[in-house]
Image (cartoon, helix red, strand yellow):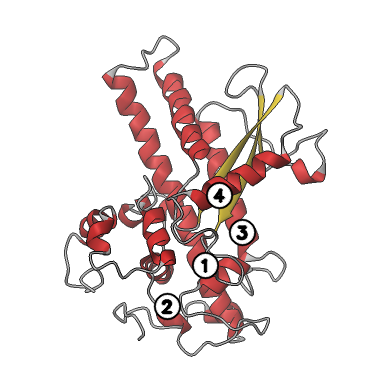
Amino acid sequence: SEFIAESQKSVQTKLLSLVHDRRAVDRDGLLTPFQKSRVDSLRARGALSWVSAFPTSPALEFPANLYRAAMCYNLGLHQPCLQGVSKCVKGHDIDLFGHHFINLGCGTGIDGRHTGLFVRHNSIARTFANFLHEAGVPKPKMDLPGLDVNRRGDILAHDFPDPGVHTVFDVTVSSLLSANLQLRGPVDMEPGRVAERAAEDKRAIYTTLQPPFSFVPLVYETHGRPCEQTQQFFFATASVATTRVLGFDAVEGSPEFAKIRNGFLGRWSRELSVSLQRSNAKMIVYGRAAGLGLGSAGILDFDISDDFQEIS
């Protein structure tokens, strides 16, 4: 509760410090397997970048009602905006944490056609495409001629990371919970297992991809942990962007190179983290409005001034 009282100062610092020390979070050993997996996902590098991001650009803007929903989702608290909501727009029972909307996307679309799952996916893909563009890739393309519909991918980067190599990127956001809200994996699974399994599934689809094409999965858990290959992509792309700034005679091990690369990594991490959690929050808020039959008029009609609270 100390994290959610309005009078508290340095709340982000205290939250990040404790989340990264799971022994402090679970000092009594009372966390459920899912709660442990959630904390482990939050402990990944960059997963909580959205918490301390300043809205200095549209990419980092996070409206108060959405920020609140994202904070409740990641802290494992009941969503105050879902009090009194028992069904989604499709008549399914919902949970008060928002998992139903984030996992299934019922009623979370903006235009009645595209669900929040689609919108979140495209938001993440566009964010990654912007990173590639900053690294010098000519406007990354979404058209992949010669590939079947199941291997279309989300982004095609020509001559990246090397001349003559055309890299296909496929974005996936995977929840720790299945559609029926069961943990995806054994109760004692290692941190990152859900992201790595999703990456393996993507790689299996692209095993027959022939040169000059290569494949990179861009996978995130809904709480922010990326798969290992996504982390490698981030680092490699930041190095390419840094070389573009300093020139091809730049020394990668120099302090100047590290400083500029870390600048790219920090900013990109915040933009990606905000995009992911803002999309998650929109799914909860939009799903709630649709479930109550309020449409877009109900997205901002609930009070956002109450303290955070966990419903017993």
Q: Earlier in the sequence, mark 3 or mark 1?
A: 3
Query: Nearer the N terminus, badge 4 or badge 3?
Result: 3
Residue 83 placed where, x, y %?
Answer: 45, 86
Pick whichever, 161 or 66, lies toward us: 161
**Which amino acid, by three-letter code, is at mark 2?**
Gln
Q: Are marks 4 and 1 in contact (CB under 8 Å)?
A: no
> Residue 124, which numbered label?
4
Lower sequence index among marks 4 and 1:
4
Q: What is the spatial separation of the Cα atoms under label 2 and label 3, in whole angstroms?
A: 21 Å
Q: Is residue 259 above or below residue 95?
A: above
**In 3D space, how far apart are the residues under numbered discs 2 and 1 (Cα atoms)?**
13 Å
User: Relative to 16, is 80 on the left or the right?
Assistant: right
The x, y position of residue 93, in whole percent, is 59, 84
**32 sits to left or right of 25:** right
Which one is nearer the viewer's eye here, 93 or 117? 93
Q: Secondary structure at mark 3?
A: helix
Residue holding disc 1: 282
Give the foreground label among 4 and 2.
2
In this figure, which residue is indicated by the disc labeled 2? Answer: 79
Determine whether the residue tagged by mark 4 lies in a helix, strand or loop: helix
- Cα separation, mark 4 vs mark 1, equals 14 Å
Mark 4 and mark 2 lie on one chain; the one further toward the N terminus is 2
- Residue type, numbered disc 4: Ile
- Pointer 3 residue: 119
Say whether marks 2 and 1 touch (CB < 8 Å): no
* Callout 4 crowding tier (Cα within 10 Å): few <14, some 14–19, many ≥20: many
